[in-house]
Amino acid sequence: QARFQDAVKFEPHDSQHRLDLGQVLHAQGKHQEEQAVYEKLLADHGPNALAYTYAASSLLAGYQVTIGHRSYGKVPEDQGFLDKATDLYEKAIATDPNCGMCHGQFGDMYKDSHKISKAIEHYTRSAQLLPHVPTIFCNLVYTKLFACDWRGYDEDFARLMRMVEAETAPDQPPPRHLCVQPLQAVLYRPLSAELMRRVATTYTRKLLMEAGNPQPIPLP
């Protein structure tokens, strides 16, 4: 965090440093500090699509902490936060209609608040703009399942299977950034015993590597 604060101090006109600082604060759960960073960025530099988007996501993340991490949109008091976040996301897309991250995070809000058709709309646009980002495509696939939207079903799952097979290839080390979304989405269809074994092995190896490779706990 201190390094990003120094970057903002020495290069105050670089918006990216402020966005990076905000994301570090987000990862630390310091949502009020994070939102202050985005507010300062917008005040100093004017409209910024990612600043609006990250501010909206931070607002919702902070609210979820206060309500015990339940999904929102179920009780009337949620609506005020959803309205504020919606306003920020809409400003983001008005600033840059082709911001894939903006559409993706707007889709997250709609999915989590059970507005599935709107979530699909934004995930679809985000996947078009960011075809190389697996999380967005996977969010689109399993959100479409919730809506019983079977368009492109076979093609979507064929692509998911390729993702899972690539991530769990036995002759390759676990990816540095192992993405759980392909597995989450593909589990809506049965997998072979061999692929399930590969998935379990890959995720176990990844966890052991991140924990400093301790001895695995013997299983009965």
Image: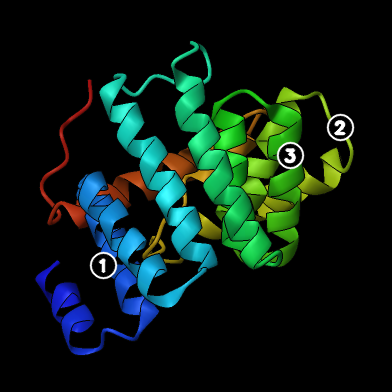
Q: Position of residue 34 (x, y in %)?
A: 27, 54
Q: Judging from the image, what secondary structure is the residue with disc 3 in?
A: helix
The residue tagged 1 is 21
Q: Which residue is mark 2?
A: 150
Using the rendered image of the protein, determine whether residue 165 is visible from the camera's viewpoint.
Answer: no
Identify the amino acid type marked 2: Trp
Residue 78 versus residue 39: which sits nearer the camera? Answer: 39
> In the image, what residue occupies the spot 21% across and 55% down?
210
Give the secondary structure at mark 1.
helix
Across and down, in percent, residue 191 comes to 63, 33
Label 3 sits on residue: 120
Q: Earlier in the sequence, mark 2 or mark 3?
A: 3
| 143 with respect to 201 (left or right) | right
Q: Position of residue 176 (x, y in %)?
A: 36, 65
Cα–Cα gap, marks 2 and 1: 41 Å
| Mark 1 residue type | Leu
Q: Nearer the viewer, mark 2 or mark 3?
A: 3
Residue at 46% across, 20% down = 78
